[in-house]
């Protein structure tokens, strides 16, 4: 299981909420320590 900061999960959840309600979501800040893969 990967560990992800709770704040990042909250930001992703808020982004999906914006998308579902037809609003433009803000960009998500990606932590520098994430590996360079599909999440980054």
Image (cartoon, rainbow, N blue to C red):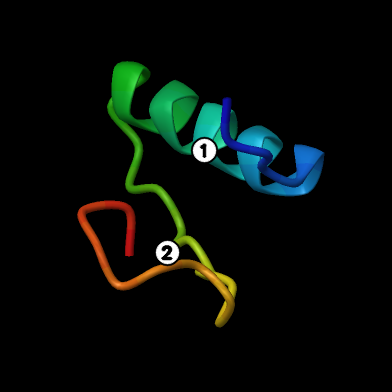
Q: Nearer the viewer, residue 14 or 35?
A: 35
Q: Secondary structure at mark 2?
A: loop
Q: Which residue is mark 2?
A: 27
Q: Mark 2 Cα within 10 Å, few/some/many (few <14, many 20+)?
A: few
Task: Name the spot of residue 28 as percent of width and height, x first.
Answer: 48, 61
Q: Which residue is mark 1?
A: 12
> Which residue is situated farthest in the bottom direction here?
32
Whether residue 3 sits left or right of residue 16 in the image: it is right
Q: Secondary structure at mark 1?
A: helix
Whether residue 16 sits left or right of residue 5 in the image: it is left
Any mark on residue 31, and which?
none
Earlier in the chain: of badge 2 and badge 1, it is 1
Q: Residue at x 59, y 72 (%)?
A: 31
Q: Residue at x 21, y 53 (%)?
A: 38
Q: Mark 1 Cα within 10 Å, few/some/many (few <14, many 20+)?
A: some
CA–CA distance in space, label 2 to label 1:
10 Å
Quarter of the image containing the C terminus?
bottom left
């Amino acid at each position: 299981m990967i560990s992800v900061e709770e704040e990042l999960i909250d930001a992703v959840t808020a982004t999906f909420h914006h998308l579902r309600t037809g609003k433009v979501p803000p960009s998500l800040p990606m932590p520098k320590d994430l590996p360079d893969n599909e999440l980054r």
